[in-house]
Amino acid sequence: MSGIVIDASAILAAILGEAGGDAVFDLLDEAMVCSVNIAEVYTYAAINALPTDAIDAFFADTGIEIVAFDRDHAVVAGGLASITRKHGLSLGDRSCLALAKLRQAEVLTADRPWQQVADAAGLTITLLR
């Protein structure tokens, strides 16, 4: 495996100081995030009327690799729908999982349902808490 893909729930845990959020900071040297998941983080802030200063600082200060959602990424994410749909995973979730498949990386998330698709997706999914 090469690197770790961090999803929106893990990034929010780090930014908001939630349980397990420290683990994100420990993994930044090998971490990457899909651009779709960044949109999820900013969406959370907008819906919850949170200022985005801490989010901006997180991405500016950590140096986490941001991976654009391109055609190959979209094809892999779409292909995951058949195994993730019954577990309620969204396009954002599949975008994260697709990046992990493309990069042969582990996934870090706070979303427990993801572990139910790990074997079928051929991924190692680690829970933040």
Image (cartoon, rainbow, N blue to C red):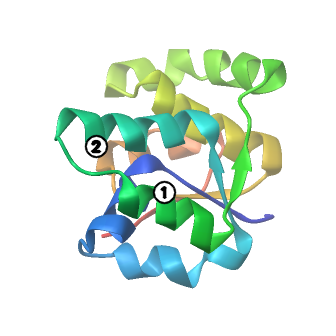
Q: Are marks 2 and 1 in contact (CB under 8 Å)?
A: no
Residue 107 rendering spot, x and y as whole percentages: 57, 56
Kind of residue at disc 1: Asp
Look at the numbered disc 2 and give the secondary structure of its residue. Answer: helix
Give the residue displayed 22% in from the left and 49% down from the top.
50
Q: Amino acid at mark 2?
A: Ala
**Residue toward you, 72 or 86:** 72
Q: Is residue 85 above or below residue 97?
A: above
Q: Which mark is residue 45?
A: 2
Q: Nearer the viewer, residue 50 or 103?
A: 50
Counting from the top left corner in percent of width and height, residue 1 is at 79, 64
In the rendered image, which quarter is residue 4 located in? Answer: bottom right
Q: Where residue 77 sits: x, y (%)? A: 64, 24
| Residue at image location 57% in from the left, 60% down from the top | 59
What residue would you read off at disc 1? 56
Q: Residues within 10 Å of mark 2 (few under 14, many from 20)?
A: some
